[in-house]
Amino acid sequence: MALIKDQQLSLDHATTPELRFADWLSDGQNNADAVLANGDDDLASLLTHANKLSMIALEFDTFADGRGFSMARILRRAGYQGEIRAVGDVAMDRIDFMQRVGFNAFELRDDQEVTEALSKFGEVTVHFQPSADGKGPAYMA
Amino acid sequence: MYAYNQYDQALVDQRVDQYRDQTRRYLAGEIPEDEFRILRLMNGLYIQRLAPMLRVAIPYGLMKSQQLRAMAEISRVYDKGYGHFTTRQNMQFNWPTLESVPDILADLAKVQMHAIQTSGACIRNTTTDPFAGVSADEIEDTRPWCELIRQWSSLHPEFTYLPRKFKIAVSGSASDRAASQVHDVGLHLYRNDAGEVGFEVIVGGGLGRTPVIGKTVKKFLQPQELLSYLEAVLRVYNLNGRRDNKYKARIKILVNAVGVDTFGEMVEAEWEQLKGGDLRLPWSEIDRVKGFFTGPDYLAAEHAEHDLSRAFAEYPQFATWYRQNTRDHKQGGYRIVVVALKNQLQAPGDVSHQQMDGMAALADEFSFGELRSTHDQNLVLADVAQRDLLALWLKLQDIDLARANVGTLTDMINCPGLDFCSLANAETLVLSRQINETFDDIDYQYDIGDIQLKISGCINACGHHHVGHIGVLGVEKGGKQVYQFTLGGSASEDASLGKTLGRSIEQDQVVVVIGQILDVYVELRETDETFLQLVRRVGFAPFKERVYGTHQRSAA
């Protein structure tokens, strides 16, 4: 699976954690600093412990589940600076919006072509609302 | 009205390119069917029973004459020469090919139009009062606020994969002409006791399978915080709305599950993080947008006014049309003209390309080049001088749009039904034809007076039957199309949900039953009592007795 990180194809990176956030919590939070979470996880708890984590992989079981977008947005707003990696059903037609809300790494679905995916960042350059990327409408400038 | 700047134009142009590429990759087999379905829906493209259907956005129902002309041209080039106005003030084309849609979108972009977010689980076109800015009873013009919502919601990166679609309506008058209480969010502009104008926020209304009247979640919202509050509502919904069952995924289900007070607390907690921040609208921005809606260059009242008594005497039908299809205007000497898209031969809301071109020309000649589409599938020329009314009426006859039936029985709302829609269980257009044939005596319609008949071809309720004074819902039972009646609904400021009258009625008996219901009304009404008032006063018993006491052919 190809990984895009910080808008580049990444060839050398940490593997996506298999340890689920809930298990990490119940195991005493000491055995790892990267977890896998999804929309069913408790966001308040994730926020409480985020500073102990270098990577939070947010999993999309199906691309139609948009909860991860708000989770990433809130993690960034809370000051989380580690990697937020989108995993699961991740395709090129969503990574620009995902980047806007705070994801900085994307584990692409197997059928996705990396070069084409990279061209999708900034496909639409106009932003009518602020988000985690610091961009926003003209009146905010 | 609002005119695009370079940012708006760049957004729609880039969106066309993006969708063109998505279509290309889909046709090349590079995007799976279920994924492309979501991508095309985000651009308003459905696959219907017979062909694709493209829904074009008309933000809050406002358009320029050249935009309507462009849609007429699109209907000629890519479709079968007609279009259909929806209850969300949008335009639908029923026969484009999937391959041609990028070209249609490019043509639309040339006239500052698009199909962005006209479908899909995202924030849809914001709707409002078709008389915004011109109505005599208005507290404040809703259009600048709709435009601010349009911009904020356009390609919002976080709210594109919501649990379900999300619809916002804005009302700025005591009379609610935007059905705001049956929307996911309804916003009421009003003046509080301190004299400040702000929003009452209603949440969790809706129709569909589970009709609900919305509940007040915030009594008074400072207008500068409109977007921050909406963002908080959407974020709470995106994180907490149900995703396991699409029929339980609308915000109304969440609000009912946790209670509106708890829901309000969840929103407040999120809003604490947002208010006063980036989304707080500076007055400079509010004023900039308001500057697009300052109103046209009206003639002084003494030049616009005209004594119509001679014209009324000479053309009695003109007098009738004036009474039925025009409304008071805040500007002296002007009238609001409602052009009914409800003639005998066309489906409700349908317009031919000739009618579109004709209406565009009339807007240029008589109403400052602007038009509005309405929630009840009509068009409005909002700024017509009294001295021009007769000429306008005469020219409307040339395009078969002079029918003086606004607000009457035949001014019905009608979804396309089984003739077009892949969700429908029953035909609806056959009913509108039968109703037009049966109740063709216009004087009878005037005698019945103000009545809203709303017809849906399935439980998804695109025809808003729950809020019809008379609602008709098509269902399929044992392979037959039968129809359930509801009475007593309203989408106005006195919003209420209609209740089921009784067992289903066969298709060929629907007009009979409507006639029986109206007979009861005529027999029992008191002076000046409307149909809705009577239903609320006398209840269902006399209607049930009339319909079911003698009715022999009802379906099981």
Image: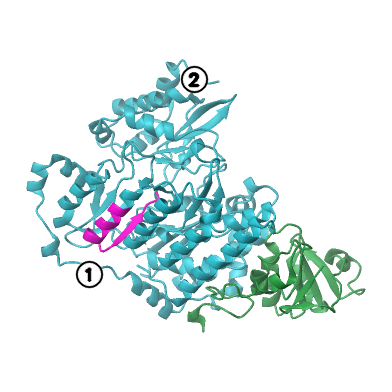
User: Is any atom of residue B435 visible in this view?
Assistant: yes
Rendered image coloring scheme: by chain
Task: Relative to B278, say whether B158 is above or below.
Answer: above
Quarter-of-image position of residue B164: bottom right
Looking at the colours in the rendered structure, which chain would you say is drawn in green?
A
Residue B167 position, x and y percent, is 51, 56
Residue B254 position, x and y percent, is 62, 53
Q: Which mark is residue B74?
A: none
The answer to which of A72 and B119 lies nearer the viewer is B119
Badge 2 sits on which subunit? B
The answer to which of A111 and B41 lies nearer the viewer is A111
Quarter-of-image position of residue B260: bottom right
* Mark 1 residue type: Asp
Which residue occupies 44% across, 62% down?
B108
* Mark 2 residue type: Ser
Q: Quadrant of the C terminus of chain B?
A: top right
Q: Quadrant of the N terminus of chain B?
A: bottom left
Which color has been applied to chain B in this rendered view? cyan
User: Is any atom of residue B497 visible in this view?
Assistant: no
Quick check: is B250 in the magenta stretch?
Answer: no
Which residue occupies 66% across, 66% down?
A94
> Is B41 left, or right, of B346 in this rendering?
right
Secondary structure, mark 1, is loop
Secondary structure, mark 2, is loop
> Is B327 left, or right, of B151 in this rendering?
left
> Is A122 left, or right, of A86 in this rendering?
left
The answer to which of B249 and B124 lies nearer the viewer is B124
Q: Evaluate whether label 1 is on the same chain as label 2.
A: yes
Task: Relative to B335, say whether B471 is above or below.
Answer: above
Q: Which mark is residue B554?
A: 2
